[in-house]
Image: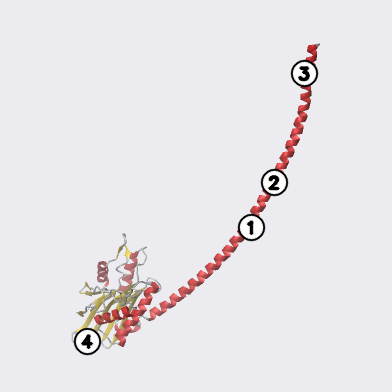
Amino acid sequence: MESFGVVSMDIFYYALVFLLFPAALLVMSAIWSGSLQDRVKIKTKELQEANEKLENYAATLEQKVEERTGMLNETLGKVEEANNNIMASIRYAKRIQESLLPNMDKIRKHLPDSFFLWMPKDLVGGDIFYADVFENSMIISVMDCTGHGVPGAFMTMIASSSVKRIIEDKGCRNPAEILKQLNFIVKTLLKQDTGDAVSDDGLDAAVCFVQMDSSAGTVLTFAGAKLPLYYIQDGQAHIIKGDKQSIGYKKADLDFDFTSHTISLEPGMSFYLATDGFADQKGGEKGFVFAQKRFKTLLQEVSNRPFDEQKKELIRAFDEYRGNYERQDDMTLLGFRL
């Protein structure tokens, strides 16, 4: 009986646990389910708040982008307007610089066998040339001023007006004396003859004076400041180098006497004046400069053609050699036969 009682009590306890366990599970499940719902609600609310913040941030960012875009467009408009004004000024400056060039109808009337090639690197440039005809004589000159673009163009105004003053107002016809006076005018005008000079600008130049119907026949006198004279005689190219002295710079000697070279003209002789823009141009396969020697040979090769064809061939040869290389400098080249 005692053993039966012990067994019965065990069964009772097991039965009680068996009956209460599902109920406990239900209670715990209810509690856990409620807690999960609360967590879901909290997370949902946090997510909604985060989305609202993100939407507000996106709207603010879009507004800022629109404002910045508007500011940028306004700035670009101002820059474009300023650039248009600058370009308009430079185009007008080009007209002024072109007005400094000789009257080509007048020159070609006296020099039908000739060409004049003036090619600034930019809209305006640092090269300029001068030519004028007098009674039984003429003067032809090329000048290569410091720099190119607008600064070079300012220097051409000084050089051109100074040469006209020397030749037309003072009546000077001697190329060596023209260069000497030009050296004095440019250097003193820019105050580069003083210790307080803030600039160091100048130019290289070549001047030819042709005297026709003289006792010695037609005679050409040349003087150069760094720039040479090329001429073709009997199919052979020759070069007369200018003095190793530039014009107007701080180190330019005001007392320097340029050298005169005189040539008695013979039938068929051709003459060429050029700045260094052609010979100094980089190109070819290795990017070397065209060089004076190659330029001299080219002039010899084209010299037997009409001058309008010479001009075209020289431009073609220049562009072909340059290829994809950038233009190095302004270029001026004059050719004539008397």
Q: Can residue 107 be seen by looking at this rendering?
A: no
Q: Can residue 52 be seen by looking at this rendering?
A: yes
Please tell me whether residue 114 is drawn above or below residue 2 in the rendered image.
Answer: below
Q: CA distance from mark 1 to mark 4?
A: 89 Å
Please tell me whether residue 8 is drawn above or below residue 319 in the rendered image.
Answer: above
Within the image, what quadrant is residue 199 found in? bottom left
Element on which disc 3 rests: helix
Q: CA distance from mark 2 to mark 4?
A: 109 Å
Q: CA distance from mark 3 to mark 1?
A: 72 Å
Q: CA distance from mark 4 to mark 3?
A: 153 Å
- Name the residue: 76% across, 27% down: 21
Q: Residues within 10 Å of mark 1 (few under 14, many from 20)?
A: few
Q: CA distance from mark 1 to mark 2?
A: 22 Å
Left or right of 242: which side holds 160? right
The amino acid at mark 2 is Thr
Labels 1 and 2 touching (C-beta < 8 A): no
The amino acid at mark 3 is Asp
- Name the residue: 73% across, 41% down: 37
Q: Quadrant of the C terminus?
A: bottom left
Q: Position of residue 179 (x, y in %)?
A: 27, 79
Left or right of 278: which side holds 75? right
Which residue does the numbered mark 1 point to in the structure image?
Answer: 59
Element on which disc 1 rests: helix
Q: Residues within 10 Å of mark 2 (few under 14, many from 20)?
A: few
Q: Residues within 10 Å of mark 4 (few under 14, many from 20)?
A: few
Q: Which numbered disc covers residue 213?
A: 4
